Image: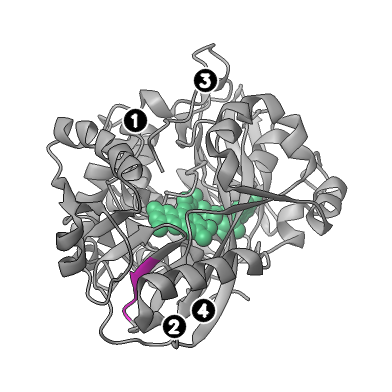
Amino acid sequence: MAPHVDPVRSDEALPARADVVIIGGGIIGVSAALFLAEKGVSTVLCEKGHIAGEQSSRNWGWCRKMGRDPRELALIIESLRLWQGINERVEAETGFRQPGIMYLAETPAELGELETWLEHARQYQLDTRLVSRAEALALMPGLTGNWVGGLFTASDGKAEPQRAAPAIAEAARRKGAAILTQCAVRGIETAAGRVSAVLTEKGRIACAGVVVAGGAWSRLFCGNLGIELPQLKVLASVMRTEPLSGGPEISASGGLFGIRKRMDGGYTVATLGVRTIDLVPDNFRLFFPYLPAARLHWKKLRFRIGRRWVEEWRMPRRWGLDQTTPFEVVRVLDPEPDPYVLDRARTAVGEAFPLFRNVAVAERWGGMIDVMPDAIPVISPVDSLPGLYIATGFSGHGFGIGPGAGKLVVDMVTGAPTLVDPTPFRLSRFTDGSGPRPHPLAS
Ligand SMILES: Cc1cc2nc3c(=O)[nH]c(=O)nc-3n(C[C@H](O)[C@H](O)[C@H](O)COP(=O)(O)OP(=O)(O)OC[C@H]3O[C@@H](n4cnc5c(N)ncnc54)[C@H](O)[C@@H]3O)c2cc1C
């Protein structure tokens, strides 16, 4: 079941031209549209389904620095600065607050692993610190169990995924961007070796710049352009409870559960502990690039084979711009949640917080996370096609970093000094022999 998302209406007319076209109306695409519009750059955002229909409305809503891959730290720090002003900027409620995030440890060895990350926190002067069992219990009302302590970042935040990207999209429109939904982009036209237009299902938009912010569809889109993007999909499952009083304000994860208090008074509940992989042909095509990540997370992975194999096997990987594309066939990627994963998360949260045992689950949903072999995104120009930029592959942590990533890609498109050093996010890392690797401590 798809979670409810604040609706964003579509502009009616397809502009004949724009400076920049953004493909995808998730948190990355709408943030880029906002910052482009604020700079007075004429911008059209095309979304095949509805705004935030995929990952950006289905995530946990954590905006965290803690536990990040060090290569992302500078960008998440800037992103949180942008989140802090976002409600005023978009004149709407995105739900952004900073109640803090806690990672609980069940054993001294686990606490030791968490402690290793503190070295990165120190380098960036973050307020992340180890807390004792007693302090964890004091910070999190209702917590029981044998936790030995935790890692806590008081300034880490949260926002409402079902409200944030729609609010940003509406603000982008007020500042001059055109927002088109039910408008799949089929491909790109070039002239003199650079981007000259996008072809949508509704017609052509002449443009000098294109940002691919297509989430889990980016590999397919780029593949048709002859650009290899080694991206895969991982199923994550989530539920939300009915309102529950007396529980923690702080977002937390430990063992097999993760929770965040929502503005509606309920909790978003899920787990970092199990990830479902529905095998598809791409898992075999990309077997070697993903081997290091698979080795690192082996115990957390749950492989299945079924309908999705057939669906992806049948999906065309090449098409002409006058043909119906897979983006028009699947308007919203709405996978079934994995009941095995959710049942385990439910049991685990009830053990940690007895308060949760009797609360009703109001909704369950699945979301397809777009991952990269090194679990950090691509935010990069495409050297082989001037005018084309990619911002995708956020590997399960793109919501919090979304505004920062949107700003970074806009800096690239407009030739402004970049918000942070973009080198770690370059597309060419997969081909220049630098051997991208997942960071062993990052989550
Ligand atoms: C269950 C779950 C939990 C998560 N928890 C967190 C969290 O707590 N914190 C965090 O920071 N991150 C989290 N994430 C990750 C985060 O949600 C994503 O990294 C982020 O939302 C990615 O945003 P996006 O804009 O790149 O992609 P998406 O939100 O997936 O948007 C891409 C959009 O592009 C559109 N599109 C694709 N191709 C085309 C085309 N050809 N034409 C037109 N439109 C197209 C799609 O329809 C889609 O709407 C989680 C993800 C999931 C699934």
- Report the residue marked by disc 3: 428
Mark 1 and mark 2 lie on one chain; the one further toward the N terminus is 1
Instruction: Tell me the distance, in whole angstroms, between the alpha carbons under discs 1 and 3.
Output: 16 Å
Q: Is residue 190 above or below residue 312?
A: above
> What is the distance, in whole Å, between disc 4 and disc 3 at their CAs?
38 Å
Packing grade of label 3 (10 A; few <14, some 14-19, many >=20) is some
Of residue 365 and residue 139, the one placed in the foreground of this image is 139
Earlier residue among tags 3 and 2? 2
Q: Work out how far the residue at label 4 is from the one at label 2, CA to CA, in angstroms.
A: 25 Å
Q: What residue do we see at 77% from left, 52% from top?
A: 325
The C terminus appears in which quarter of the rendering?
top left
Q: Position of residue 163 (x, y in %)?
A: 39, 72
Q: Which residue is mark 1?
A: 71
Q: Position of residue 269 (x, y in %)?
A: 45, 70
- Mark 4 falls on what kind of element? loop
Residue at x-position 30% and y-position 71% = 144
**Disc sitting over residue 160 in the figure:** none
- What amino acid type should be assigned to the residue bearing mark 1? Arg
**Left or right: 280 in relation to 349:** right
Crowd tier of the residue under label 2, counting other residues whose Cα lies within 10 Å: few below 14, some 14–19, many 20 or above: some
| Quadrant in the picture for residue 63 | bottom left
Viewer-proximal residue among 276 and 418: 276
The numbered mark, 4 or 1, whose residue comes first in the sequence reads: 4
